[in-house]
Amino acid sequence: MTRRFLTLLGVGAVIVLVILLRQLAVVPVSGQTPSKDSAAPAGSGAKTPWGEPDLQGIWTRETEVPLQRPSKYADREFFTEEERAALDKQRAEIIGREASEGRRKRGTEQDVGGAYNQAIFLSHLRLGRRTSLIVDPPNGKMPPFTPEEQKRRAEIVAYTLALMQATDLCKNKLPGCEGGKYGPPSPRRAETPPHYLTGAQGGPGGGGGVINRSDGPEDRGNSERCMVAALPDFTGFRRIIQSRGQVSIFYDTGQGQGWQRVVPITAAPHLPANVRLWWGDSRGRWDGNTLVVDVTNFSPKSNFNGSHENLHLVERWTRIDEKSIEYSVTVEDPSVWTRPWTVKQELNKQNERDNRIFYEPRCHEGNYGMPALLAGARADELAFKQGKGPDPASICLGGCGGFSGGFADDGDDANPLR
């Protein structure tokens, strides 16, 4: 009897102790997500349990703002409300007409180049107030290219046009062949490209791949190889998680081309110059409530608007209030642009439950589509050799034009914000 009483007494004491512990505010260890009871109130002054500004959550843009300011809006920083409404209506109508029979010419290379119906496969956001993400220079446009970069881009354009010259694109003088000519297959088809191809080379046309050839994966560019995700990113979702001494950011971009980034909070120098990374080497520090991140050491095969290994970024992440972060980045590459330039973007917090993400890349073109695409190119070559098909050089495979992002290359259905 005594033993049973003591056992019950012990169990009761354990229960009481558990209840008391649950009521205490427990400070989580570094790397754990703060509990609802222990987390500081959200907002511009929100702090992690170890005292740093709290940037955690799932964040994305909720409006669309062009990177560069359309020329028609000159030095105007903001749209009027009437302009926003009219442009939203116009853009929605254009995208909605993409699949209409009156707009497409079935069987053409341009129709194939716009195979994705953008009204279905892409999210289209309301237009934001700003006329450009670029805030410096004040005209809202990238600075001029350096003479070196102009020469590089001209070489890529000339090579691209040479590979297209036997196609209907040039025969019919479509926008994708602007600056080129129609003629027999060019001997340049056997040449190595003048520069490494990434898919953002300044060449003409839209839709399809990078160049009009499929000798190997490198001809198809980063997008078809599931390697298009770049830093800085102004489009997708990012999930931020903090722990002592580091900030982890998962980017969900494009067609499942997610990638993970860890920013150490440290005064340590960057990696040695001979160590190059796809998304660069980040070093973070706190400046008041702002996380400042310096990024260098990009790979020669990395690409952001034509900038590669010389790209240098200075990012600033500032919590404005409970539901928004101001993201600012200054972009510098003296081999590409004549001066640095700066972008500002508002990111809005998303509901954790409604926006659950698969935390791994899931872009399948690089795993399945690429081998099939290259096999198809070899089959076309064999058929031509046997006299059973057209010369592959006369079939446009990249930069053929079409409906990039749901908009036509020119005319009434062109993007009104370009």
Image (cartoon, rainbow, N blue to C red):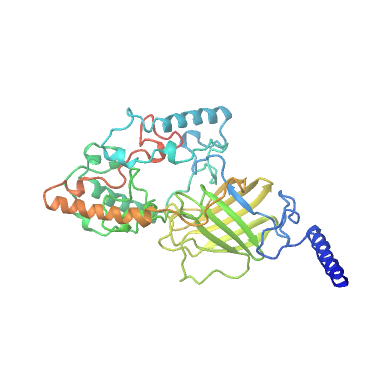
Could you tell whether 369 is left or right of 257 in the image?
Answer: left
Q: Hey, which quadrant is residue 8 in on the image?
A: bottom right
Going 33% across and 44% down the picture, which residue do you hit?
A: 204
Q: Residue furthest left?
A: 387
Dividing the picture into quadrants, the one containing residue 198 is bottom left
Residue 345 on image: x %, y %? 57, 46
| Quadrant (top left, top right, bottom left, bottom right) of the C terminus | top left
Q: In this view, does 397 lie to the left or right of 299?
A: left
Q: Which of 342 and 305 is in front in this view?
A: 305
In the rendered structure, the answer to whether residue 13 lies left or right of residue 400 reads right
Q: For this view, does 73 lie left or right of residue 366?
A: right
Q: How far across and how far down the image is residue 383, in percent?
A: 16, 51
Q: Residue at x 60, y 50 (%)?
A: 58
Q: Residue furthest front?
A: 1
**Vertical relation: 99 (above or below) 319:** above
Q: Which residue lies furthest to the right in this view?
A: 2
- Asked if one can make out residue 251 in the rendered structure from this viewpoint, the answer is yes
> Residue 110 occupies which quadrant of the picture?
top left
